[in-house]
Image (cartoon, coloured by chain):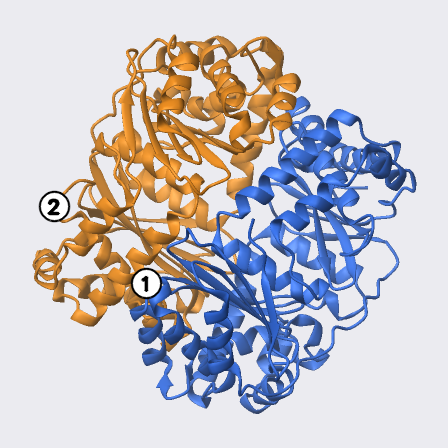
Chain colours: A blue, B orange
Amino acid sequence: MTIPVSETLDNGLRVVVEPQPWNPGLSFTILVPVGATSDPENRLGAASMLETWLWKGAGPRGAHAFADALDALGVRRQSGAGVEYTTFSASLLPEGFSAVLELYADLLMQPQLPDNAFDSVRALALQELAAIEDQPPQKLLMRLRREAFSSPHGQPVQGVRETLEAMTPEALREEFDNRYGARGSVLAVAGGVDPDDVIRLARKHFGSWGGETPEAPEVRLTSPHEFRIVQDTEQVQLGLFYKDVPPGHYDFYASRLAAAVLSGGMSSRLFTELREKRGLVYTVSAIPGSVKGFGYLTAYAGTKPDSAEETLDMLLGEIERLSQGVSREELDRARIGVRAELVLSGESSRARAAALARDVFILDRARSLEDVEAEVVDVTLDRINMFLEGRPFKDPWIGTLGPGEVVK
Amino acid sequence: MTIPVSETLDNGLRVVVEPQPWNPGLSFTILVPVGATSDPENRLGAASMLETWLWKGAGPRGAHAFADALDALGVRRQSGAGVEYTTFSASLLPEGFSAVLELYADLLMQPQLPDNAFDSVRALALQELAAIEDQPPQKLLMRLRREAFSSPHGQPVQGVRETLEAMTPEALREEFDNRYGARGSVLAVAGGVDPDDVIRLARKHFGSWGGETPEAPEVRLTSPHEFRIVQDTEQVQLGLFYKDVPPGHYDFYASRLAAAVLSGGMSSRLFTELREKRGLVYTVSAIPGSVKGFGYLTAYAGTKPDSAEETLDMLLGEIERLSQGVSREELDRARIGVRAELVLSGESSRARAAALARDVFILDRARSLEDVEAEVVDVTLDRINMFLEGRPFKDPWIGTLGPGEVVK
């Protein structure tokens, strides 16, 4: 059993470490709460463009030297802006840890944000926007979020053509100065490291980081409604958005387990009814999501145009039917599935670092895998069925994408 | 350091185990050499349809009871047919291991293949085909393989509409009888298990499995040529296919490291030249692939129509430029990157089980991570540059997908 160690530096940066003594590698995630939710309306896509621009040189190194330095340390990196935050993740061999942290400190505290790279940053953002147009499921689910939230949570991470084209280096630098900072950010580390060493190195490299990050805005929703995107595709895409309980809520894991009964494994209701029995869909899912203080459930299916209406009716029907409760066998299967997933996620330093960073951001505390497992085990049949009796999933936002008017 | 333990059962099934004593979970992969390469021309898609059909009931259990039984053991499963083989992978908690193996033995040795599920299996296959039509990069890369191979390696895993529609339960049962069997198949296990226990359980549950599996066909290629798919997309997709050295070849890791210099990290040539300097593409990659006895390199880029020609020229140019060799710094960065990836893959029981199964299929032996690492470390600057001097990457097959005639 490994317990995460937490520490808040004087500048407000929160550091959390989960040691995995058996692990010859390590991973970290730096979470900076800068995302689409804090993009000003006339600067949609700013968080995402900023993340790209940061890599164009930092501290004493230009873009190329910076990339060379990271690659010379064998760093496998992932980074990107999302709805609420931007994450910078890296996996590496422990001997390079201090040098890598120093590079990331340069990236976040001393980026060059050079004028001469700005046009290529914008060109990339426009390319990404075009690529989404060619991915019907992603396009529909992005629009679904936009239709459901009236708060900035619906803003497109990638921005829109107009705001990307209007962006200037000055505007983006202003966004960096206003929004990047230590207070509110999180450094989470998992792997073959000593927590004291990590906290010492965090203080050394990030101790002088100043500044604050934006507060999370409150969630507001539109009224549930339907919308259609007409596009000449082979398959019709269907998306539903339901309100759900927020992270930290007493019923949070009851709801998670209900979603697993609906869509967790081969024996899940959606898989069985829509795919196995009727062959209506190749892919069908109901996936819970959350932002700070708010939870939602997104259901998705792709099907042939002539099956679209039946598929939508069945999807709505199965989610409605949850209010009649689940059986003991369904709950037991959902629970062991969720538990197995938790235990198996413990293998991966990358998954653990990302989960710890998100925990601190969403819940203000890091949980061990065992803590989460205990919350899952605590959900009794009575408890989940009392929760479902209240009909928690109702009145969805409904979106379709496909050729012509395929859905009434 | 963990060394895989190998054993061949009397029926020819090869079992390989990599113990990870620290791991509270485990994963296994069963590889059966049944894939698109052994689909008869008039039964394209048979291997893929079979894999779906197997799940429709096995041993004493119907489809639903079978799914319930696996989910009740908390199994996280993945399975699917590919070019050369079908894999059945599962991750789970060790206490359920024997019961899960017994279920998989039923699946592979006693499937019910019931008539009444056949139509839904075919409907799923047609849905999958339609979904690929809506994914331009996948569609192009599938076609690229089809254009390059004249041997069955080019056959589409998902089949084509005509063969799927003509398939009958009798035909598919015949394919199962002819192609599924113990000899040639592999069971690979990684995680918190004792190798002796695994081999005992394998013998118990799979010892009575009979039959043989198809021999891998020899690779044959067409002459390099160009092709175009006209489709109304936002982005133009570009794909290149190059011959490469086969797995087990003296220069295999020299070639892998050359591919990493081209496309391995932030400082890689394609990322730097096409994305960072010019903003031509959001995604660009050159990814080595292999089948038994043959290696290839696939390059991919997505870009705006008015940049397609420049992007293609640069892609071709960068790959051509490899023949001038790489610098010591490039090699060092590529090598530590590949090494870090190897070490980090050792965290995941699922990744290790899959890699071991593939090793046994492709190379006839399982390698430890340390064995692979040693092969990577062995590639000196002289060795890689001598390899590249021979201009190993030349005369590509070139495919484009996009609106109208975007590329000369």
Tally of numbered discs? 2
The percent position of residue A55, horizontal first and vertical second, equals 44, 77
Q: Which residue is depicted at the point 54% across and 20% down?
A: B99
- Given residues A266 and A276, the one toward you in this image is A266
The percent position of residue A249, horizontal first and vertical second, equals 81, 54
What is the crowding at mark 1: few (fewer than 14 residues within 10 Å), some, or many (at least 20)?
Answer: many
Chain letter for mark 2, please: B
- Given residues B238 and A113, the one toward you in this image is A113
Q: Which residue is depicted at the point 58% across and 18% down?
A: B56
What is the crowding at mark 2: few (fewer than 14 residues within 10 Å), some, or many (at least 20)?
Answer: few
The answer to whether B97 is drawn above or below residue A108 in the figure is: above
Residue A306 visible in the picture: no
The percent position of residue A99, horizontal first and vertical second, equals 37, 75
Q: Which residue is depicted at the point 81% across and 70% down?
A: A218
Chain letter for mark 1, please: B
Q: Quadrant of residue B64?
A: top right
Left or right: B151 as drawn, with respect to B103 = left
Q: Sequence-wise, which precedes: disc 2 or disc 1?
A: 2
SS under mark 1: helix
Q: Quadrant of residue A158?
A: bottom right
Residue at numbered disc 2: B250
Residue at numbered disc 1: B312
Residue flagged by tag 2: what amino acid is it? Tyr
The answer to whether A203 is drawn above or below residue A269 in the figure is: below
Q: Same chain for the residues at labels 2 and 1, yes or no?
A: yes
Q: Nearer the viewer, mark 2 or mark 1?
A: 2
Q: Which residue is depicted at the point 72% across and 43% down?
A: A376
SS under mark 2: loop
Residue furthest to the right: A390
The percent position of residue B98, horizontal first and vertical second, equals 50, 21
